[in-house]
Image (cartoon, helix red, strand yellow):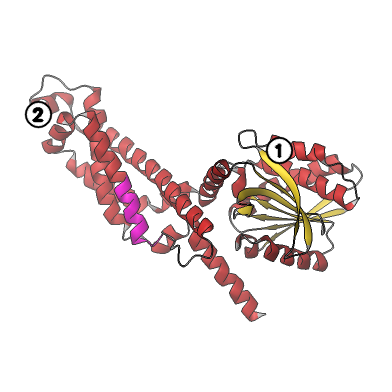
Amino acid sequence: MIRLGLIVAPGTAKNIINKIEEELAEDLKKQFSATDDWEIDIVVDPLTGETEFTSKIYSKTDEYLRENDWDFLISITDLPLFYKDKAVVIDIDSSGGAAMMSIPAFGWRPLKKRMKTAIINTLSVINKSNNNDTDIEEECRELKSMFTLSKLEHSEDYFEDSKTQHLLFYMNSKIGGTFRLVSGMTFANNPYNMMQSLSGVTAIAFATGAFGIIFSTMWNLSYLFPTWRLVAISVLSIFGMLFWIIISHDLWENFKEGESKRLTSLYNSTTLLTLFISLLFYYLLLYLLFLAAGVTLLPPDFVAKTIQVENIGVRFYLELAWFAASLTTVAGAIGAGFQDKQVIQESTYGYRQRMRYQENEDENGES
């Protein structure tokens, strides 16, 4: 029996590993030895989602190795890791036979297959290191092949603070690595969950707009406004709501209070992108609701007669829904200010990290 310990951060890391646990055990058996079964122990530890400093996490993984009869150990964090200012995907401690993986570095969709492949190849590297086999180029090529758009580099380095030798796989481009990190962190935030937290706001906005579209003022304005003006109104309404939610729910991380300006910048960028995607979903939903309401409630002949035009076509209903969605997004922004602040904050990295810091401090205090 070969035992693998996976120390995972709460949230995205835990969910992904739970989905691949059974497949991973079977694939590991095929990859390493058909006669040995694999037992995978999953431990959820907020420490793996608490800090960007790998030495602190590795000191905790050493404790896990001593306390458990594991042959291999991999920590999977949902925080970005860095080496020489470049995003790290995998950090292997050659001295201790453990490794760390950063889920955000996998990008927007860290699919189960990619995570599983990365774990298997990482274990192959660790296994060869334990057996003093330095021929790991094939495993390195396998890991790099998963990142066709953002090329990986790998190098060995000695970490003076922890007195350990490491093999690191990291992005060769700072810009490309940052983009991948932000997209991966946005995926971990799950914009759809934030959209669900705005369901009450959607109801308020639609109720306001449904009342407004039965009056001819909105018909005339949507009919008379040129496309550029409709675009300007929609952009202003979406970004206005975005910034209002950030301000009213204290979502912006203060650079002076943060431990790392780099992390603070990533948190803020991720919050902006997460909110923007959520609001696009919100806006699209409103648009479809108003389009259906307009087609159902407003007979074209009656509308044409009221606003004194010859005929009303499909374009009128499309632009009316567009205009109504933009106007009611403003009303929705006001309603968003009264939403449960904690529900919104839980969809941001900064808030979750503060909760993990607090949880870890409470555990250390009790011990």
Examine the image and state in which quarter residue 305 appears.
Answer: top left
Quick check: 117 left or right of 317?
A: right
Task: Reply above or below: 61 against 80.
Answer: below
How far is the residue under mark 1 from the one under mark 2? Answer: 62 Å
For the point 7% across and 25% down, which residue is it?
308
List x then y, in percent, for residue 5. 77, 57
Which residue was labeled with disc 2? 307
Q: Which residues are magenta?
A: 239-251
Name the kind of residue labelled 1 in the image. Lys
Name the kind of residue labelled 2 in the image. Ile
Q: Is residue 151 magenta?
A: no
Residue 293, visible in the rendered structure: no
Q: How dense is the environment of label 2, judged by Cα within 10 Å: few (below 14), some, or many (20 and up)?
A: some
Residue closest to the eye, 148 or 116: 148
Quick check: 221 left or right of 352?
A: left
Tally the marks. 2
For the point 33% across and 61% down, which residue is it?
248
Which residue was labeled with disc 1? 144
For the point 77% across and 40% down, which residue is it?
140
